[in-house]
Amino acid sequence: MKSERRKFFVFSHKKRTFAPIMSTIIYSSPIFGPVHSRRLGISLGINLLPADGKVCTFDCLYCECGFNHDHRPSLPMPKREEVAQKLEETLQRMQAEGQLPDVLTFAGNGEPTCHPHFAEIIDDTIALRNKYCPKAKVCVLSNSTMIHRSEVHDALLRVDDNILKLDTIDPLYINKVDRPTGHYDVQQIIERMKAFHGHLIIQTMFMRGNACSHPLPEGGESVDNTGEEFVGPWLEAVKAIKPQQVMVYTIDRETPAQGLEKASREQLDAIRDRVIAAGIPCTASY
Ligand code: SF4
């Protein structure tokens, strides 16, 4: 159940040679962990994507799984029955060891709502949670691109923590940093987020730096979304969506693109305080 860290190489036009890019993580499937965290407690990961690669409707410059085209999977997504069976086996083992999870987290090698049976798997997971660890939360980390599908929307209403990505409302920035692989209209995403009527947590990555996208152009472009031209409109959208909570964070692990820099603690605290001042609970992770 261990995740795998890999190192890849890209061509550097400046040095005229191949240079190592940051190592990335490909998670086991369908279950990984558990991971112990001070904030979440014991978190058991559920990865609905293939075990040997990444499937995502975004291709973020900061993705810890790496760029999509470097990790094309050859294996299929796990079947619904396999997810339920492996989850039950893991929960039985954890129960026998006296260490049941505090949270069951849908994350891993890409976008969990891409799985064609996401909604049914959510129901299976809730049933197993109720059977083995009724106090544990079911949490989904999603990039929001599938919330227009009614079955995905309804399934996310049934989980405890529906954590949805909204890094900015600037379409140019989204195309540069989150890099949707298909049609993406941020205003439609905002409207779909409003339709959860508060049953969502918005997660936003803030960062600085001049990133080299892939393949590396000479120079690089600014990926700084900590300025008022980004934060102000984002905050207005957050207020309109009325989430139960906002989580702002910054780069924590190695990233596939070079040149990304962490937002400062002071910047994140200032953004957090503006969200709280708007009456919405907010946490900052550094
Ligand atoms: S949405 Fe998440 S999984 Fe997909 S590319 Fe971005 S960081 Fe990676």
Image (cartoon, grey):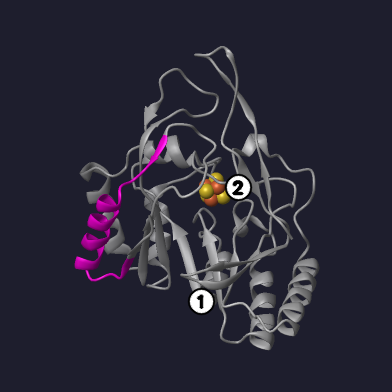
Q: Secondary structure at mark 1?
A: loop
In the rendered view, tell whether residue 140 sits above or below residue 9: below
Find residue 65 and report its horizontal and vertical position in percent.
60, 45
Segment tinted magenta in the rendering: 260-282
- Tell me the number on the disc at residue 160: 1
Q: Residues within 10 Å of mark 1 (few under 14, many from 20)?
A: some
In the rendered view, tell whether residue 172 sits above or below residue 111: above
Find residue 103 and report its horizontal and vertical position in percent.
57, 74
Mark 1 to mark 2 CA distance (whole Å): 23 Å
Dot 2 amino acid type? Cys
Residue 169 is inside the magenta segment:
no
Quadrant of residue 83 in the image? bottom right
Mark 2 sits near ligand 1, with its Cβ under 8 Å away? yes
Query: Quick one: quadrant of the N terminus?
Result: bottom right
- Tell me the number on the disc at residue 278: none
Find residue 284 and report its horizontal and vertical position in percent.
34, 60
Q: Residues within 10 Å of mark 2 (few under 14, many from 20)?
A: some
State whether residue 236 appears in this view: no
Front residue (pair 7, 197): 7
Seen at 43% across and 69% down, the residue is: 200
Say whether residue 132 is left or right of residue 242.
right
Say whether residue 204 is left or right of residue 156.
left
**Among numbered discs 1 and 2, the one appearing first in the sequence:** 2
Check disc 2 and report the residue beneath it: 56
Dot 1 amino acid type? Asp
In the rendered view, tell whether residue 257 sits above or below residue 284: above
Query: Quick one: quadrant of the C terminus?
Result: bottom left
Say whether residue 35 is left or right of residue 88.
left
Q: Secondary structure at mark 2?
A: loop
Counting every numbered tag in the picture gives 2
Front residue (pair 119, 204): 204
Find residue 94 and report its horizontal and vertical position in percent.
71, 78
